[in-house]
Each structure stands twice: as structure tokens, then as C-alpha cells.
Amino acid sequence: MVDVTDATFEAEILERSDQVPVVIDLWAPWCGPCRTLTPIIEKVVAETDGEVELAKVNVDDNPKLSAMFKVQGIPAVFAISKRQVIDQFVGAQPEPKVRAFVQGLLPTEQERQVAKLIGAGDEVSLRQALELVPGNEPATVALATLLIDQGDHQAALAELQKVPETAEIRYVAALARAGDAASLDDADARLADLLGRVKEDPEARQQYLDVLELLGPDDPRTAPARKALTARLF
């Protein structure tokens, strides 16, 4: 269980929900039904042995979160997985209903098996995970990263092309295409060199984009470089 604030919501709820379902209990010290629900929900979530996590939010101290969830009555309970609300209820509930709510968030046996295979991390296990769930993004990313580490960049790209593009997929694909040039020690010089060729040379344009992908959106060079690319192309 973790106490969450307006400031820690991103890391402790949204980012964590990428890994496991998170139950959010919105409460206040003066709320009698909250005191009834709290020990029940803590007990039931604890019984999942980490497959579901509990985050508690004091609505009096965290008005932004209250507004975000459009709280009109407490206790209000939300379940979040992959950054999306997937279930919710309002008001104190008896233990059987809380247990059913939490059990509905637990992974299936297949999901447990896939997670175990991904955790093993070797190529055989990762390919077995993808046989169970073709297109599973975590398994695909793990396998592609392993292949890059082994120097098989084309095989890594072939795996990444089997799944829809996401931010993580783009990043790993950029690593695979960059190969030995993945180091960013000379990023400024490479961007300057490639910029002169991006309009006529698709390969140079892709290399330029890959450097930006590897730099990431928070690097101070990224935004100006993207503007320079747009100006050169259009």
C-alpha cells in the first residue's frame, strides 16, 4: 500500500499500472464509511501477493486528484490498468463484493505464464511467450533488445515490425537501425551532417529521426533539431 499525492500520482499510479493493476482508494479522515472499507480493501489486496497494488488518496489533501476522478462521494474506489480506469465503485461495500472486485483484476493463468517467461529473459523463453500471445509488446521488446545485444539487428527489426508502433517500439527500432552508431557522443555532428541530405535521401532522413529518437524528447537538442528537419523538408 502507498499513500499517493497530487505530486506522486504519475509515478506511483500511472507508471505502476503499466506493470500491475492498481486499486485507488479515495478517502478522507472524517469519512465513517471510509473507515469501514479501508481494512477490508487492504486485506483483500494484500491477499493477491503483489498481483494487485493499493494506492490511497486523501481527497482533502489532494484536490487535483479528486477533480481528476470527478469524485462526488467517498469512499470512491477505482481500478487502473495500463493507465486506464477499468472498474470502479462508490461507497463502503461488504467483503465479498470487494473480493470479487479485486479478483476481477487478477491476471489469467496464461498471463501469469507469459509474465514468468518474460521474466526468465532468455531467447527460448521469450519466443515461447510470443507463441502463447503473438504480438505481446513486452515480450517483443525484450526479445528485440536481446537480439540487439547479440548483434543481430535485422532479426530485432523483423520482430518489432510484427507489432503496432508505440514509443517504446520506436526507441528499440532506432537502436536496432543505429547499430554501432547508437552512441550519442557525436550526436550534434551527425545531425548536422544528415540534415543536409534528409530531403533527397530517405535513408539519411531515417537516420536523422533515429538520432532524435535516441536523444529522447527531454534532450534540449531534440526540439530545435525537429524544427530544423521540418524547415528543410517543407
Image: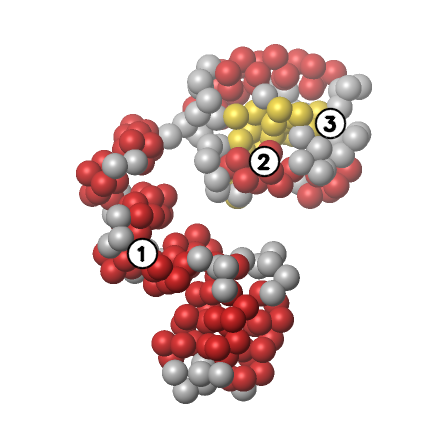
Q: How busy is the neighbourhood of tag 2: few (under 14 within 10 Å), some, or many (20 plus)?
A: many
Q: Secondary structure at mark 3?
A: strand
Measured from the top left, where is residue 39 in percent x and y? 61, 12
Which residue position is annotated with label 1? 160
Q: Nearer the viewer, mark 1 or mark 3?
A: 1
Q: Secondary structure at mark 2?
A: helix
Looking at the image, which residue is at 48% across and 26% down? 52
Which residue position is annotated with label 2? 13
- Would residue 162 be seen by someone viewing this image from the given angle? no
**Could you tell me the amino acid type at mark 1?**
Leu
Decide which of tag 2 and tag 3 comes sooner along the chain. Answer: 2
Looking at the image, which residue is at 54% across and 84% down? 232
Which residue position is annotated with label 3? 58
Q: Secondary structure at mark 1?
A: helix
Decide which of tag 2 and tag 1 comes sooner along the chain. Answer: 2
Measured from the top left, where is residue 19 in percent x and y? 46, 35
Give the alpha-carbon distance from disc 1 to disc 3, as whole Å.
42 Å
Quadrant in which the C terminus appears: bottom right
